Image (spheres, rainbow, N blue to C red):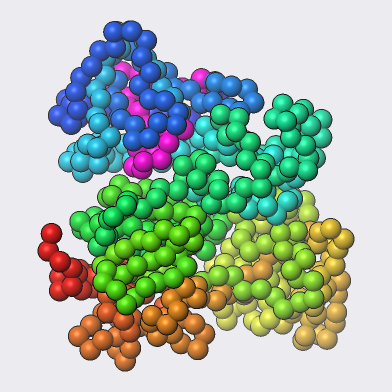
Amino acid sequence: MISTADPTDPWLRKAQTFPRLSEEMIARLSAYGSEETASERQLLFRRGDRAVDFFVVIEGEVRVYADHPLVGRRHLFNYGAGQFSGEQILFTDRPALLSGECSAGTRFIRVPHRRFRAMLTGESDIGETIMRAFVLRRAGLLRHQSGGVLLIGHRDSAQLLGLERFLVRNLYPVEVLDATDQERASAVLGTLDMTEEDLPVAVTQDREAIRGATNAVIADRLGLFEPPEADTVHDVAIVGGGPAGLAAAVYAASEGLKTVVIEALAPGGQAGTSSRIENYLGFPTGISGQALAGRAHMQAQKFGARICVSRPVEALDCDTAPYGLALSDGRTIRAWSVVIATGARYRKLDLPEYDRFEGHGIRYAATALEADLCVQQPVFVVGGGNSAGQAAVFLAQSAQHVHMLVRGEIAATMSDYLVQRIRNSHHITLHEHSEVTALQGESRLERVGWIDRKAGMEHLTPASHLFVMIGASPNTGWLKGCVALDRSGFVQTGAGYAPAEETSPHATSHAGIFAVGDVRSASVKRVASAVGEGAVVVAAVHRYLAGHRPSS
């Protein structure tokens, strides 16, 4: 067992991460599978296998291993009597990350993969225990970088950081070998028959080296992309996996609709990059955007929603029934109804040489990945909304100092609890009525020029990173005339735009196509409201399908 002194380590929370089921619970689960006894040493599940079964140990133990591209196979932990196998991979058809074997004489219940969801639904109290354990087990794999992929490259490389962010946000374990450790990096590259010119490179557990990888290539090689089922027409296709899209997926799938979610990057949307959301109902101590997105992602999968990541929708054919959604790889997904939940993309500052510093100091999210790059370094945060405030408070824990620039008064656009934290922090300096005027540096950002409009003074301040959080523009270019948009490109919905027979405030100008969350014109840009819209729109989808979907 991996040991650590940190009490937040999931491996140490044994009662929740590796719970033991009672004999009565095990007896109930046996109805969903069959009892077996291993006659010899037996491999129950193997890394790389898809649609693996679920096991409950009755007698004996199951030893679980992870493979590493450099050090080979290593033992992680055991499942003993009363304990069960698996983690969130069981909700998908993705390849298993770990292998598990037992000795002769081990008794266990095997629940086939196809019966796993029925078991969770039928035994809800046991399902709650299993779900909690699966969340913690995946968190443990991420924390200990076990069972995943190795990235080799320069730590401040934009491409490396982009790949790492893609993997982490999709809850895939990743370890980074910084190429600035030249002795170790050169030795590893030599064993892979590569040089520094090949960086960054991803190395799988099978020691397959992937050069010049994109998100789509990585998703394909690691099995993160689950292609839509061929010749299948879905009841609803949800475009976008942010809070609104995931909420719609949970409610649609739980109510029996055949649901697919198409997400270009990773579940969570912009909210998934928030370091901590403290005013979301039900989480008095706050929750990170990634943790919230991860739970919603698993919840949608629990009810059977299929989530396709790494492939954006490039066009919508709204002249056919069912509708056709063209993906970037040439595939087409067909659905009787569509929910637009694509949110918005980050806005940029209009400055000379801005593009040169993107990925080399300019950032649009403040997660643990970015915080690690800012340790004991001065940084700037630009923006006056809650996202900017959360970023400043979070970065102040690791950065040397945080300068926050706001064009107006911070109290006018930010929640009061954040305003008070920023004003009272010794590690944050707030500059109101101020904006960035210049960026300087050689190969990466080194200085930020800015002006205090109220005082009329210009400044040039050392900074290694500039976090730009000045709002966003809607992701609606792919709609190409299918629905009415406002002047800013947001989707117009409800009375005055929707067909006369449609009463939903989320209905667009085209029957059967709905919009929720930040992409919708005049929506409230808050996580809670996006979740509410995603939940509510499913009722309108049901009404539409009742009159337009052929009976099965």
- The image shows residue 16 at horizontal and vertical percentages of 38, 34
Left or right: 464 with respect to 318?
right
Residue at the (29%, 64%) spot, across then down:
335
- The image shows residue 339 at horizontal and vertical percentages of 34, 69
How many badges with numbers are in the image?
0
Residue at the (27%, 56%) spot, across then down:
232
Residue at the (64%, 81%) spot, across then down:
409
Foreground of the two, 408 or 519 = 519
Left or right: 392 with respect to 147?
right
Which range of residues does the magenta coloring cover?
Answer: 75-97
539 over 306 or under it: above or below: below
As drawn, which residue projects farthest toward the bottom? 496
Can the viewer see residue 244?
Answer: no
12 over 352 or under it: above or below: above
65 over 239 or under it: above or below: above
Within the magenta stretch, is there residue 89? Answer: yes
Can the viewer see residue 487?
Answer: yes
User: Can you tell which quarter of the image residue 380 is in?
Assistant: bottom right
Foreground of the two, 98 or 222 = 222
Residue at the (65%, 66%) spot, across then down:
422
Within the magenta stretch, is there residue 210? Answer: no
Q: Quadrant of the C terminus?
A: bottom left
- The image shows residue 138 at horizontal and vertical percentages of 45, 38
Left or right: 278 with respect to 513?
right
489 over 392 or under it: above or below: below
- The image shows residue 4 at horizontal and vertical percentages of 57, 28
Magenta stretch: dominant SS?
loop
